Structure formats: structure tokens, C-alpha cells
Image (cartoon, rainbow, N blue to C red):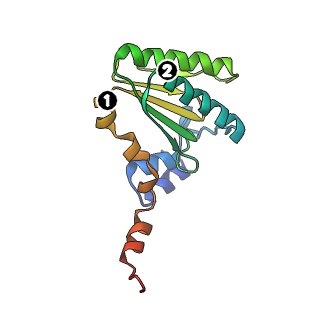
Amino acid sequence: MPSASLAEVAKAPGTARKKAVVAGPQGARGRKIVREPLDVAALDKYLGVITESLADDKGEDIVTLDLTGRASFADRMVIATGIADRQISAMATHLETKLKEVGLKQRVLIEGAGSSDWVLLDAGDIVVHLFKPEARALYGLERMWGADLDEPAEAEAEAEQPVNS
């Protein structure tokens, strides 16, 4: 039986994806996992290391999305493209090493590094997605998590208002 918070989320308006994000991650026995956010200075430091490392490894189209207040699993998302499996795997390995060197205390989790079109790195408050070009276009994370999707009603209301001249 779902907890009261999940039942409330299920009744809330919005897409299934947004409802899942609002509900947040669930641990064993359905208990909500509470994560302690990094301070802004540490977050910016790690984000700088990530983007610099990806650029050094010839990552293409590096995009950083601010998820603060929009997702419970992370505050930032970084998306980059690599041309070959080997390049993507090397980018992931280098990121893990560099984050450890600058003092990231938690373990960086890497999924899909064994020859895949998509590698995910979970560095706590920062999630990094490394794609081949075709997979990046297919999954469209920039469209899914872009800020322009959060306020469609406001944009429509502004467009409907008459312009005073």
C-alpha cells in the first residue's frame, strides 16, 4: 500500500514523469530517501571539473541544466556527446578520477560503460549523461528537462494577451 505522500502525488495534476520526480526516490520498504544537498560553492567546483574534463576529452555539445527545485535526484545535469564507445568510456573514467582528486567524498556510480550508446554517471547532486549522437537525439534529455517545458501555461497566457500600442 503506497504511503500518503505517494497517494497525494498520484492525485496531483501533471505528467507521470513529473509525478515521479515530485515523489522522489524511494528506499527499502517505501521510505522516502532524503539527500543532503551540496553547498553552491562545492556544486560549482565539481561542475567546473566535469565540464573542463569533458572538453579536454573532446566531448561535443556539452550542456548543463539546472534542476534545482525541479528534481529530487540531482541539482544539475550535464549532457555531452562522444563519437565512439571508447571515447565515451574514457570520458567517464576520467571524470570519476578527477572528481575523486578534487575531494568528492561519495563514490561516483557509472552505468553503461561497457560498450554502450549511453553512459550515466551519478555524482550525487550532479548527474552526467554521455551519449553517442544518435542516442542523444533519440532520448532528447534537453527537451525533457529544459526550462521551457516547466511553464507552458505562462507562455500561452502571455501569447494570448493583447499588445497595447
Q: Which mark identifies residue 20?
A: none
Q: Earlier in the sequence, mark 1 or mark 2?
A: 2
Q: Position of residue 105 (x, y in %)?
A: 69, 23
Residue at mark 1 to residue at mark 2: CA–CA distance = 19 Å
Q: Observer-nearest residue: 7 or 121?
A: 121
Q: Would residue 107 appear left or right of 11 to someone viewing this image?
A: right
Q: Position of residue 71 (x, y in %)?
A: 53, 45
Q: Observer-nearest residue: 70 or 103?
A: 103
Say which residue appears at 44% left-offset and 25% top-offset: 59
Residue 13, quarter of the rendered image: bottom left
Q: Observer-nearest residue: 118 or 4?
A: 118
Say which residue appears at 49% left-offset and 35% top-offset: 78
Q: Would residue 108 appear left or right of 20 to someone viewing this image?
A: right
Q: Dot 2 corresponds to which residue?
A: 110
SS state under label 1: helix
Please state which amino acid type lies under the numbered disc 1: Pro
Q: Dot 1 corresponds to which residue?
A: 133
Quadrant for the C terminus in the image: bottom left
Residue 88, quarter of the rendered image: top left
